[in-house]
Image: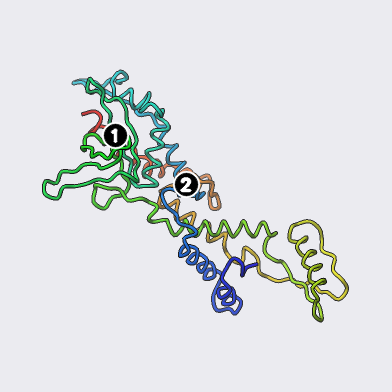
Amino acid sequence: MLESIIPRKAVESVANGETGWESAFQYLVDNSVRAGKIPPTANNATQFATVYACINVLGDDIAKLPWKSYKNHKNYIEKDSSSDVSHVLNVRPNRFMNPFVYKKLIITDICTYGNHFSYISFDKRGEIDELIPLDPSNTQVVVDRKTREYGYQTTYKEQPITFLPHEIFHIKALSKDGIVGISPLQSIREQMSTMDIATAFNKGMVEKGGSPQGILEVDGTFDKEVKTKIREEWQRVNSNENIAVVDLGMKYKQIGISQQDMQFLEMMKFSQQQIAAIFKVPLHKINELTHATYTNIEHQSLDYVKNTLQPLVTQLEEEANYKLYT
């Protein structure tokens, strides 16, 4: 069964004591990636459970926060609920989305593509009418090297167009140049592949009843009919039906290879921790509670608000103050 999943050479090296199961698993990772079977990209990233969980947690936590508008007078500050910006942010960002969905989309784009772009649509009076999300995979920031002016090349209403900076609401992830954000998926692509392969392996093991717990030994050789009967009885055991009844002369011998010995679960947890760390999401937020206690969960929650949510909120506020309120 293992040889149908992991290359024979890798299995033999483990059996001979030359390498551990981690090396055999790495064979599987490398072969699958080279074969193009598991190409983690921004388009399929949310198919990976941990990535989906992290993005969903971040999106929900930002989306449920109110986006209030205020007017700053000389001696006091008052809440503003009648302006065009307030209506767009708190009532209807565009004809398709409510504020919660729109804010969650912003975070989803940042986490998958590294950038979120929205076209700021104005009405005839010059007031903001809508914030229309653009496809991040089809939007590029272009900079004129001579004038140092920049714009946004994209497709809008099925036509290529270049928007001016003040027409685009741009939120970005970590950036090396301050202009374009970097997708977190570039850092976790290997972990995503590892987790996907481990999940597929575990699924196959479960479907086959888990790893073999023992082998049948018999003196002599088998003919085809006997082999078929033994195989059918053995498959019944592996499918969790009944205890196998073997003929006289057969011996059952336990073997020590188990799924835990292969350390696949540990490797999956390690990849899960790496992915959560890149998104700055505490493990208890994605239901990984192996080492969780009430005390450390409380501290992690406070740290999550200060070091994960607050930077995102700050960037949203600063971009809105510059692009929407001025």
What element does badge 1 sit on?
strand
Callout 1 amino acid = Tyr
The outermost residue toward the front is 159
Q: Look at mark 1 in the image and give the residue it sits on.
A: 119
Q: Is residue 269 left or right of residue 307?
A: right
Q: In the picture shown, does residue 269 fall above or below 92?
A: below
Say what amino acid the circle numbered 2 marks: Thr
Measured as percent of width and height from the top left, residue 293 is found at 53, 48
- Residue drawn at (18%, 21%) of the image: 74
Rendered image: mark on residue 46 = 2
Looking at the rendering, which quadrant does residue 93 occupy? Answer: top left
Report the side of 315 relative to 12 (left or right).
left
In whole angstroms, how far apart are the C-alphas of marks 1 and 2? 25 Å
- Count up the numbered dots: 2
Q: Nearer the viewer, residue 38 or 170?
A: 38
Identity of the residue furthest to the left in this view: 146
Mark nearer the viewer, 1 or 2: 1
